[in-house]
Image: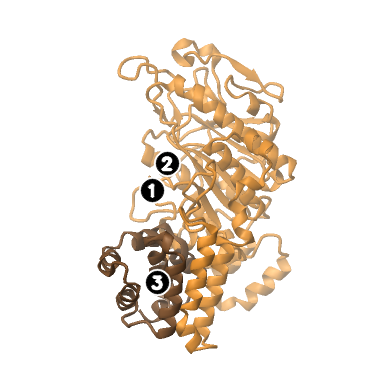
Chain colours: A brown, B orange
Amino acid sequence: MLSERNNEPSDAQRMYLINSTEVRQRIENSPHLSSIFDAAGGDRGRLMADTYVLLLSRRPTALEQSAAEEYLQTRASQGRGAFNDLAWALVNSKEFLCRH
Amino acid sequence: MPALSPAGETMARRLVLSIVLLPAATTVCAVAWAAPQARAKSVIQIWLWGGPPHTDTFDPKPGAGYDYTGPLNKTIQTNVPGIEIGELLPLLAQQADKYSIIRSMTHGNNGHETAAYMVQTGRQPGGSLVFPSVGAVIALFKGYDHGYESLIPPYIVLTQTQGRFSEVGFLGPKCKPFATGGNPNANRFEVEGIIAPGISDERQQARRGLLHSLDTLGIAMPGEPVLEQLDTTEANAYDLILGEASKLWDLSQEPTELRNKYGRTTFGQSCLMARRLVEVGVPYITINYGGWDTHKQHFQIMRQKLPEMDRGFATLLEDLSDRGLLDTTIVWWGGEFGRGPRVDWEPPWNGGRNHYGQCFTHVVAGGGFKGGRVVGASNATGEQVAERPVSVQDLIGSIYELMGIDADGPLPNPRGEDIKVLPSSEEMGIKTEGRLYEIM
């Protein structure tokens, strides 16, 4: 009775992507994201560009760039945590959910 | 999948529905007609994983001698004249008017996996189909296809699934148990997917804000139905994570006195959590309570575990009763088997009890089950059933009946085979007196 892939959004799937341990750990422990984070050093522009390319296969728009920049800056004390939140936001973005 | 009418609807309405739905197969009508009137809305299953000792709990045998009783050779008179239980259960002794003790459970199997499968599904293992557990069957008949709308899943396990077999069997993800993870006795009960470890509410809010400010596709395509649905699912998800619904899991909402009464243990707080889940209408909750496989150091472990069990279980019964919930909530206590009534004194056990499926005890309360009764009896040592053998089919069939589920109705399965929700004892070739009508 398992159905085939269904692109209709469901609450359970959304919960899973937003807040499950599995997805959280995938982001925290991703070697790809780690290498992007390490390679960027403190260069937030490069960090954002590389993360966008990895997850959405494009570079961020100027608007996105400034929104993300602001988030990373205000939550700089979180360190890698703020970057994980950026990756999380892209994984949960409509663009990722519908087009990737 | 055949749609069951919710119990309580009139026959006339069912008839109308069945006529309207005629093309949807005749089984729909058959099931709707036969479904018993539901008396219970929820089941709390206290699953004592590993097998609790019947003779140290609800079927004591003080006269059997030290080789059987070990140091636990006393009983306690309960609040029901004539019913005595084990000496380490003083609080449950005061609640005996609320539950019935089935002292003649039997299936004869001593293997954890096989016995757990039998007791949780009512089926013999083997064959090519993996059958669903009682909780999954109730999630099927009382869940999303039958009017259940809550975002809280209909089948919840506190806190980890058994792992001995797949509880959902062939029913598919809708009926799968939601295991909370976390520990309800911790300061923050980190419920899987709802309360994320290490992520404060403040950070949840902040990153949700980030998600919105990066919503380029949503801004570019306003009014697009699929994208709008994603907004709805997001709002629903955050209602559970940060909204009013997230408070369900916050046991600090309960009075400290009551929390202490349940016992500040994982088991005690799981019992309290189970009550809260019943209050929001969850039809099936399993408290998966491990640590009962006591081959060694049995009596030392019982002195530690039984008071904890006593406190949590007794307070749950009292609390459900005080709130008027016990009439519609079945509490089902038991494990995959009992433990050997004769103590293993020799090395390497040095005072342990082995698996024992020949004769064991389960306890049921509420939801249409009477209290203050004993069903069946074991012999003088607790090793054999002496009166009224009860099979797992009799017990599970009784639970289904009280939940308004027709055990003889069809169970949808991937092969489209003609399979009943539950076979009867007779069909399993077990000689018993059938379902527990004397306590229903």
Please say if B430 is above or below B140: above
For residue B341, say whether it is visible: no
Name the residue type under label 1: Phe
Q: Which mark is residue A91?
A: 3
Residue B19: image x %, image y %?
64, 76
Please say if A93 is above or below B289: below
Q: Could you tell which of marks 2 and 1 lies nearer the N-terminus?
A: 2
Name the residue type under label 2: Ala
Residue B149: image x %, image y %?
61, 65
Question: Which residue does the numbered mark 1 point to in the structure image?
Answer: B165
Question: Which residue does the numbered mark 2 point to in the structure image?
Answer: B116
Q: Are marks 2 and 1 in contact (CB under 8 Å)?
A: yes
| Residue B309 location, quadrant | top right
Q: Chain of mark 3?
A: A
Question: What is the spatial separation of the Cα atoms under label 2 and label 3, in whole angstroms?
Answer: 40 Å
* Element type at mark 3: helix
